[in-house]
Image (cartoon, rainbow, N blue to C red):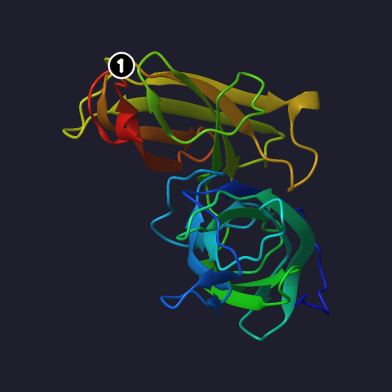
Amino acid sequence: MRFANATLVCMAVSWLACGESTAAHAVADQDGAEADVKLEVRGLQPIYHRFGPVRKDLACLPGERLYFRCDLHGCGLDGRRRTELDVSWRIVNAEGKVRQAASHPVKAFCWAREDAFVRLSERCILDDTCRPGKYTLELAIEDRITGQEANASLPFTVKPPVLAIVSPRFYCDEKCTAAAPLSGVINQAIFCECEIVGEDRSQAKVHLSVSIDVVDAAGKSAWGGPDVFDLVLEGDRLPANISQHPMFHTIIALCHPGKYALRVAVVDKATARMAELELPLEVHDPQEPNDLAAK
């Protein structure tokens, strides 16, 4: 099933990953006969970037990138263990009006396991003119092989524009082409980029003070103190319109195993307003027995 009557279409990116497995549309029951398996969408949740971490709230801001993921169970497979799906999503406001929408096909190779699933990740960008209020993300999946359909929804809110650090993204490489989770192993580097919205541009200049730190469970800095720098945009570097956001990059070197937090803060020098973002960060030692090494 594909949604129709969309008034605005935004950029969408889809990723498919074979989880521990991926499900066929029919399995053998206890008597050896084939039993139909229903296509299901499970665990639809908001995340930061492709691999998370999971967002604890869904209070979004105009201009923010909204990422979400889910697991698809009961997908049909062809003879080469491949699945073909049509994925559609739309964002509907409280009055039932479709504000953004996208549809596209996806294909994935699947492992041969009875508890199989396909993990789907999607992204949309909330328009900078998006009005504050309540919205619903509606997801529809159609299996091209079995003809089955499945749906799920996720309510969220859009807040009035305010200074904030949004859309954090994590990568394995310096060119920011290969997505990564906000976790890794000793001696690995994570490349991070974030956007800022709600900054003051009234003086034909953007002047922000950015602070980045990694802290342990007790709040103690693992770096011996935050890395602080100024982000100044003026002249040709000043964003030309509201949809262009200031962005900064940083490198997170993973040096010691444990559970930490990535702590980012921004101060707008023109208004003295401040914004903070804190996300969980895990570092593992592959030479020691732990959850990551066991997998």
Q: Is residue 199 visible?
A: no
Quarter residue 172 falls in: top right
Q: Is residue 62 visible?
A: yes
Q: Is residue 221 left or right of residue 121?
A: left
Quarter residue 25 falls in: bottom right
Q: Is residue 48 left or right of residue 187?
A: right
What residue is drawn where x is 61% and y is 42%? 200
Q: How many numbered markers are drawn?
A: 1
Where does the image place residue 277, in percent across and percent down from the top left? 41, 42
Report the amino acid beneath label 1: Trp
What residue is drawn where x is 60% and y is 21%? 173
The front one of 80 and 47 is 80
Q: Is residue 217 left or right of residue 91?
A: left
Q: Is residue 287 left or right of residue 128?
A: left
Where does the image place residue 253, in percent across and percent down from the top left? 41, 17
The front one of 40 and 27 is 27
Which quadrant of the figure contains the C terminus?
top left
- Is disc 1 placed on a helix, strand or loop? loop
Where does the image place residue 191, in percent across and percent down from the top left? 53, 24
Which quadrant of the figure contains the N terminus?
bottom right
What residue is drawn where x is 52% and y is 47%? 163
Where does the image place residue 82, in percent across and percent down from the top left? 69, 53
Residue that numbered label 1 is attached to:
223
Residue 203 in the image: above or below residue 284: below
Q: Residue furthest left?
A: 218
How many other residues sit within 10 Å of disc 1, few (<14), some (14-19) or many (≥20)? few
Q: Residue furthest front?
A: 31
What residue is drawn where x is 83% and y is 73%? 7
Residue 25 in the image: above or below residue 17: below
